[in-house]
Structures are given as C-alpha cells and as structure tokens.
Image: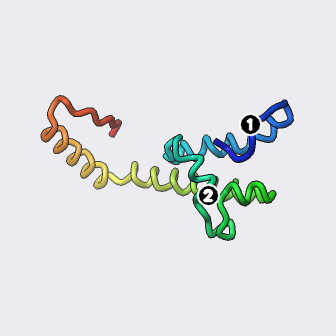
Amino acid sequence: MSPGPEPTDKSDTERQRPSAALNHLLGEIGLPAGEVTQWWNLVGHQELGGRTATEAWLAGDTDEVRLLIEGWYVATRTAGQRAREDTALLTELRRKLSELDAHYGSSNTLHRTA
C-alpha cells in the first residue's frame, strides 16, 4: 500500500501512480507484499533524515524517497548479477540444495531455478 487515502478521482489516481511504481520496485527487491505498508510507515531511513518513507513523501520529498528505493533496487540487481557470475558460489548453493533434497526426500517443496 502506498501512503495516503484511496484515490477517489482520476487526478488522485494519477498522483498515486509514482508510489505504486515504487511499491512494484520494493516487490522486485524482495520485500513481501504484506511488509510494504510497514516499510512505508514504520522504517526510518538515514537518507530521509531519520523519517519514514511516508513522512518524507507527505512532506513533499518524493524524489528522495524515489532515489532511496531506486538505489536499493540497483544495488540488489547488481548483487544478484555478481552472484550469478560466481561459479564457486553457484556450485556451493547447488551442493547445499542437493543435501536438502537428500534430507527431505521427494516431499521437498523448495522452489529453485539454480
């Protein structure tokens, strides 16, 4: 959920789009949907002067909130790319997954693409 009331007309809907796009990025980073509202409302950030994203957003500092999330997104993507290129890490992860498969057998419900 994004900060503020539900949109009631087209102009409100248009104003909600930037925060909806940021919520999408938060999901891409890996923040579960159920924790997005908590993140907006309960987590203070040094980059926002100790304020929550909602506090900064409502104060008009939308660019700072956007930059915080976009920076987090870029860092996450970069780390993921480095991990995908690290053959030793991937080999170790596959070994550990094999151990889990051996331990839990065919009832293993872990999902993976590695």
98 left or right of 18? left
SS type, badge 2: helix
- Dot 2 alpha-carbon crowd within 10 angstroms: few under 14, some 14 to 19, many 20 or more: few
Which residue was labeled with disc 1? 6
- Classify residue 75 by image quadrant: bottom right
Q: Which amino acid type is shown beneath numbered disc 2?
A: Gly
Along the viewing direction, whichever of 84 and 19 lies nearer the viewer: 19
Image location of residue 102, percent across then percent down: 13, 39
- Classify residue 74 by image quadrant: bottom right
31 left or right of 17? left
Q: Which mark is residue 26?
A: none
Image location of residue 15, percent across then percent down: 80, 41
- Dot 1 alpha-carbon crowd within 10 angstroms: few under 14, some 14 to 19, many 20 or more: few
Image location of residue 86, percent across then percent down: 35, 54
Q: How many marks?
A: 2
Instruction: Find the distance from the CA under tag 1 to the CA under tag 2.
Output: 27 Å
SS type, badge 1: loop
Q: How is the image coloured?
A: rainbow
Q: Earlier in the sequence, mark 1 or mark 2?
A: 1
Q: Which amino acid type is shown beneath numbered disc 1?
A: Glu
In the rendered image, the quadrant that contains the N terminus is top right
Which residue was labeled with disc 2? 71
In the rendered image, the quadrant that contains the C terminus is top left
Image location of residue 61, percent across then percent down: 77, 59
